């Protein structure tokens, strides 16, 4: 079942949409109702850059049930080219290939197959560049 | 503001207590606390109880009502406080404010968590992180601290051996604590060879899943003096919050809410890190004790790992940390941990810590309790009147 909560996040998860404050230009991901920098309340939708680098990472050996089939997998904090940061899995990467500073691009992937849910859940992952 | 004293402490045994329900955990700690204080329960006017997730762990909310009833305190003003793993510290702060303000004379600060009751603890604990932008993308709670650890290792050269030494030291202390979940010593090899949870953290870098409760009773110093109690005063209180998501913080090798809460507490107390004789530091993971000790100003950034290796933070070291065994060995019933820290420090300050009592009786102590990956933190500083 697709819940309202899942549906609400689709622009971020499928299309990596951020929110740019029309008053000061601060870019938020996910978008916020109130600008963290200036308190402005008017935002415009912006596409985030797809390239970035790994700031830190880990290899998860004991995951929650819905990620069990993917273990072990790498998770990283990625800083995109415009400074926006996000946490995501690194797809198809052997653990020792991902280091602090590794260049990645953000791609669209299947994320979870929770046995309690009837549908697959999608979102963004990083992929090592080159 | 009135000066506030801790006049009684109580806690259950920590561990996997399959036979004991949530309500009895709290009732037992509260009864032990009132007995220790020598105060009749009719005198207690109010209670603040830290609990992270009764709803997820045992399917029970509305805890303030149930827990005070089962503790024999039916009818008093009671509030459940939630700030993830810092729920206990936040409850203590609320109780302290109620006494300091002059509103009430006898206020109970408690904490409880029943984590072994069939719920998926990994899932429950992960709700302390950003559900939609961290957990949805596969990160676990140990995974967040593992990412802090990798950032700290990269920036300062912290090693797995340094992390392991935190666990070895805390287990050595816990072995002397009859209420600890794990009363056993371990070696570096045990930690380094353990099953991996989230690189670079293994099973023995992580605090366990624990049931338990702890309570302390607060009263104005003037009232405590009339009761003839040893006076353990709350001289500093600091509380700070930060972004819930780790990725939104500038320096991933730091936990700024801890530094900020500490700064506020030190300022109120008029003391600094060098004045602290003993501390309970939030070691939910080995790396957390290292980073938090640096944020508290006990060591320069990047130096806390070496300090652990050198024995500085051991029971007989210059800066003993987690004499109780810490969350690592004493156990981490998340809502109770912040209060259990205050219990341990009160025992140390009054010379009642048994086999783990510090040789040189401490005068000033610090408790640091943290929520999530550092999205909230409380710091309390205590001083015993000699
Ligand atoms: Zn703005």
Image (cartoon, coloured by chain):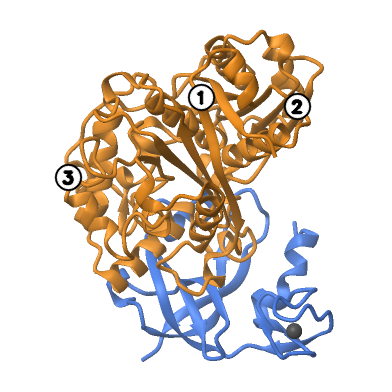
Separation of residues labelled 3 and 2 (CA atoms): 49 Å
Chain of the residue on which disc 2 is drawn: B
Q: Residue B42 or B1: which is nearer the viewer?
A: B1
Q: Nearer the viewer, residue A112 or B159?
A: B159
- Dot 3, how many residues are within 10 Å of its Cα: few (below 14), some (14-19), or many (20+)? some
- What is the C-alpha distance between the residues marked 1 and 2? 18 Å
- As drawn, the label of residue B188 is 3
- The chain letter of the blue chain reads A
The part of the image, by quadrant, that contains residue B143 is bottom left
- Identify which residue is drawn at 78% across, 77% down: A39
**Which numbered disc covers residue B104?**
2
In percent of width and height, residue B105 lies at 71, 23
Q: Quadrant of the C terminus of chain A?
A: bottom left
Q: Position of residue B237 (x, y in %)?
A: 57, 45
Q: Judging from the image, what secondary structure is the residue with disc 2 in?
A: loop
Q: What label does residue B231 carry, if any?
A: 1
| Subunit under mark 1 | B
Residue shown at 54% from the left, 54% from the top: B267
Tell me, yes or no, whether the two marked residues, 1 and 3, touch with CB atoms within 8 Å: no
């Amino acid at each position: 079942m697709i819940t309202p909560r899942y549906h609400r996040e689709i622009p971020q998860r499928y299309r990596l949409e951020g929110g740019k404050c029309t008053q000061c230009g601060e870019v938020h991901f996910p978008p916020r109702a109130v600008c963290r920098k200036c308190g402005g309340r008017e935002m415009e939708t912006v596409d985030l850059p797809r390239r970035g680098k790994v700031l830190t990472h880990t290899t998860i050996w004991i995951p929650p049930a819905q990620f069990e089939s993917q273990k072990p997998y790498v998770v990283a904090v990625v800083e995109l080219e415009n400074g926006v940061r996000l946490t995501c899995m690194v797809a198809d990467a052997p653990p020792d290939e991902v280091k602090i500073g590794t260049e990645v691009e953000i791609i669209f992937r299947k994320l979870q197959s929770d046995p309690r849910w009837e549908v697959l859940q999608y979102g963004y992952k990083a992929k090592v560049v080159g | 503001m009135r000066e506030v004293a801790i006049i009684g402490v109580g806690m259950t045994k920590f561990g996997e207590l399959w036979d004991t329900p949530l309500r009895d955990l709290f009732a037992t700690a509260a009864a032990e606390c009132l007995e220790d204080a020598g105060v009749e329960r009719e005198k207690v006017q109010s209670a603040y109880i830290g609990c992270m997730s009764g709803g997820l762990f045992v399917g029970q909310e509305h805890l303030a009502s149930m827990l005070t009833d089962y503790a024999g305190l039916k009818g008093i003003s009671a509030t459940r406080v939630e700030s993830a793993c810092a729920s206990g510290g936040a409850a203590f702060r609320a109780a302290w404010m109620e006494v300091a303000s002059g509103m009430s004379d006898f206020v109970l600060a408690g904490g409880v968590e029943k984590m072994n009751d069939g719920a998926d603890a990994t899932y429950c604990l992960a709700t302390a992180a950003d559900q939609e932008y961290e957990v949805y993308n596969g990160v676990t709670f140990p995974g967040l601290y593992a990412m802090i650890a990798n950032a700290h290792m990269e920036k300062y050269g912290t090693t797995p051996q340094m992390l392991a030494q935190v666990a070895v030291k805390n287990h050595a202390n816990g072995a002397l604590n009859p209420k600890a979940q794990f009363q056993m010593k371990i070696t570096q090899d045990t930690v380094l060879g353990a099953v991996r949870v989230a690189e670079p953290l293994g099973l023995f870098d992580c605090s366990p899943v624990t049931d338990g409760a702890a309570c302390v009773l607060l009263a104005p110093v003037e009232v405590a003096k009339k009761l003839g109690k040893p006076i353990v005063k709350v001289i500093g209180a600091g509380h700070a919050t930060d972004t819930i998501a780790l990725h939104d913080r500038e320096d991933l090798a730091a936990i700024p809410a801890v530094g900020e809460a500490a700064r506020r507490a030190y300022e109120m107390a008029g003391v600094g890190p060098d004045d602290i004789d003993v501390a309970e530091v939030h070691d939910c993971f080995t790396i957390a004790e290292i980073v938090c000790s640096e944020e508290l100003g006990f060591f320069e950034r990047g130096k806390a790992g070496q300090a652990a290796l050198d024995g500085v933070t051991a029971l007989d070291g210059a800066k003993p940390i987690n004499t109780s065994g810490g969350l690592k060995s004493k156990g981490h019933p998340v809502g109770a941990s912040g209060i259990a820290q205050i219990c341990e420090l009160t025992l140390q300050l009054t010379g009642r810590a048994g086999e783990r009592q510090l040789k040189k009786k401490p005068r000033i102590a610090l408790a640091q309790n943290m929520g999530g990956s550092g999205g909230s933190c409380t710091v309390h500083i205590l001083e015993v009147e000699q």
